[in-house]
Amino acid sequence: MKTLIFVFTIFFLQSTFAAERTIKLELIGMHCSMCPVTIQAALDMSDGVESVKVTRKPDRAVIIYDDADTSPAKLVEIVEKAGYEAKILPNRSGEKK
């Protein structure tokens, strides 16, 4: 019983401290209309990603994610595995982080 309470407490605490975050990535290497689709699909399939919007001109991705399940570094890695480069753009003051 103590083990069950401990496991429940750890799960509850982890969920309590998880937060929804937004990150913007500059995307490098997109050359056609399928590039944004490819990047969006790769990110959409990733754990912790709540929503993704990939645009051309500017070549950017705006990603809302759960920081308990993924991180900015993992999101960049996903883009790189899809065959593109990504740089994290700084949040401007006043924007939701």
Image (cartoon, grey):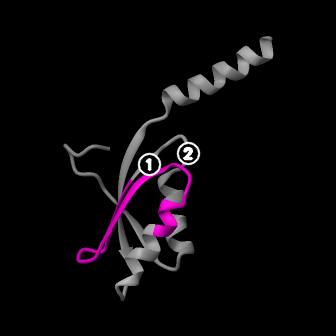
Taking the spot 34% from the left edge, 84% from the top edge, the residue there is 33
* Residue neighbourhood size for the residue with mark 2, other residues' Cα within 10 Å, grouped as few (<14), some (14–19), many (≥20): few
* Residue neighbourhood size for the residue with mark 1, other residues' Cα within 10 Å, grouped as few (<14), some (14–19), many (≥20): many
Q: Position of residue 46 (x, y in %)?
A: 55, 58
SS category of the residue bearing label 1: strand
Q: Position of residue 44 (x, y in %)?
A: 48, 61
The answer to whether one can see residue 29 in this image is no
- Residue, disc 2: 69
Magenta stretch: includes residue 62: yes
Looking at this rendering, what residue extends furthest in the bottom direction? 31
Q: Quadrant of the C terminus?
A: top left
Magenta stretch: includes residue 34: no
Task: State the separation of the CA atoms marked 2 and 1.
Answer: 8 Å
Taking the spot 49% from the left edge, 29% from the top edge, the residue there is 17
- Residue, disc 1: 65
Decide which of 70, 46 is in the foreground and name it.
Answer: 46
The answer to whether one can see residue 65 in this image is yes
Q: Quadrant of the N terminus?
A: top right
Vertical placement of residue 34 versus 51, above or below: below
- State if disc 1 and disc 2 touch (CB < 8 Å): yes
Q: Amino acid at mark 1?
A: Tyr
SS category of the residue bearing label 2: loop
Q: Amino acid at mark 2?
A: Asp
Direction from residue 68 to residue 64 in the image, left or right: left
Q: Position of residue 87 (x, y in %)?
A: 40, 67
| Highlighted magenta segment, given as a residue range | 41-63
